[in-house]
Amino acid sequence: MEKIWLCLAHMSEAGEEMKWIKDAFDTNWVVPLGPNVNAFEGLLEEMVGEGRHVVALSSGTAAIHLALVNLGVTWGDEVICQSMTFSASANPIVYQGATPVFVDSEPLTWNMDPNLLEDAIKQSLARKGRVPKAIIPVHLYGMPAQMDAIMSIARRYGIAVIEDSAEAFGSRFCGKVAGTLGDFGIMSFNGNKMITTSGGGALVCPTLEAKQHTLFLATQAREPLPYYLHKEIGYNYRMSNICAGIGRGQMTVLPQHLAWHRHMCDVYAEALADIDGVTVHTNPDERFDSNYWLNTILIDPKLTGGVTPEHVRLRLETEGIESRPLWKPMHTQPVFCDAPALVNGVSERLFSQGLCLPSGPCVTDADARRITDTLRSCFNH
Ligand SMILES: *Cc1c(COP(=O)(O)O)cnc(C)c1O
């Protein structure tokens, strides 16, 4: 019995990734710049559209960090961040000496609740005498946040928005690609994401100027002189030409990857439709177009006759199927216990009821049947 994993990297069958890695070796571009990096950025700019500019970086975390640096976030500032997320959304706020203010989710998309966001801005104003420097909504598991409401509040108060699209590569909201709806957008190409460069990320910038400043910051903030002159603190955050070669190859299979993740959502939704207390997380209406990076379900033990997500997880594990609880909200993490938080109970309920299921192109239809049969048997179906 072969183990079924949540989301494995999946290389193109044509071997495009290897072709561009070999090209980097053959041309001796084994450095954090080069033709693969430029070509990968070109492909990303073509994909996101909206006239946005993209910088390839060493990770999604580095992209969030450089977005904050670009916006001048510094010691003593507050930055509003979605609580229901992976810690990498919030850590860079602390790198800058700023304070994260966590905002809970709404139940439709599981992302930042716009009403609580406005409350958080008002509280911050009362506490500090000024509005927060930035807002970081997250498109969790690929599901776009309610970006129309979030952007209209952000614009009203004059606050910049950094979209954490690390899990939402290829998702859309109202037809626009995730990462282009805010001021900055971040992408991740870590090994477990929609596409991979082994490790990597990108910052989607609103202007060419912002792209150029990001390139400068990401390459040690070196002034354009024959000797090394520095007027700003720099970072070593550029993507390598080898990693970008993998990215170029992965872009050729993006449409197939997206189609497969969405197919898996349909498979789960159909197989679990008749089970009381189990709901598959799907687009709330036609404005939302999730990439279904990880398909997720909620299990309400009050309606399942006491069957809990942990029962199901352990049962799947004995059948060689990996599953995992949802992200544990940041306002419940010991490391962020001192951060202000606006909480409504939604993210804690999601954490207690949710489960992530295997979703990538490595999950075959036969695997899917094994998973859904096991799931159904947990509920005596
Ligand atoms: C993966 C992830 C990141 C960080 O991306 P890395 O490339 O791993 O640094 C940030 N935010 C979210 C929501 C993520 O899932």
Image (tube, helix red, strand yellow):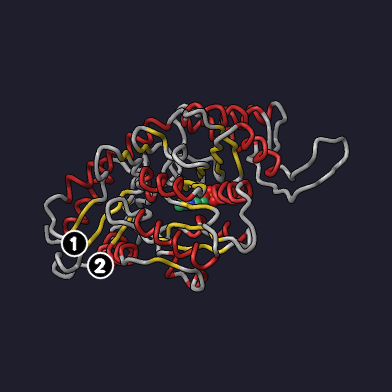
Q: Quadrant of the C terminus?
A: bottom left
In the rendered image, the vertical position of residue 119 relative to residue 16, given as above or below: below
At 65% from the left edge and 39% from the top edge, which residue is drawn? 240
Q: Residues within 10 Å of mark 1 (few under 14, many from 20)?
A: some
- Image position, residue 158 (x, y; %): 50, 48
Number of marks present in the image shown? 2
Element carrying mark 1 = helix
At 64% from the left edge and 27% from the top edge, which residue is drawn? 23
Q: Residue furthest right?
A: 227
- Say whether marks 2 and 1 touch (CB < 8 Å): yes
- Image position, residue 62 (x, y; %): 60, 49
Using residue 200 as the reference point, say whether residue 270 is left or right of it: left
Q: Residues within 10 Å of mark 2 (few under 14, many from 20)?
A: few
In the rendered image, the vertical position of residue 117 relative to residue 154, given as above or below: below
Residue 350, which numbered label? none
Question: Cα distance, mark 2 to mark 1?
Answer: 8 Å
Q: Nearer the viewer, residue 5 or 123?
A: 123
- Image position, residue 181 (x, y; %): 44, 39
Residue 378, which numbered label? 1
Element carrying mark 2 = helix
Mark toward the start of the polypeptide (2 vs 1): 2
Does the closest atom of ligand 1 sit within 8 Å of the Cβ of label 2?
A: no
In the rendered image, the vertical position of residue 263 relative to residue 310, given as above or below: above
Using residue 168 as the reference point, say whether residue 318 is left or right of it: left
Residue type of the residue flagged with mark 2: His
At 43% from the left edge and 51% from the top edge, which residue is drawn? 137
Using residue 29 as the reference point, say whether residue 257 is left or right of it: left
Residue type of the residue flagged with mark 1: Cys
At 59% from the left edge and 35% from the top edge, which residue is drawn? 244
Using residue 51 as the reference point, say whether residue 111 is left or right of it: left
- The residue where tag 2 is placed is 311
- Image position, residue 101 (x, y; %): 48, 63
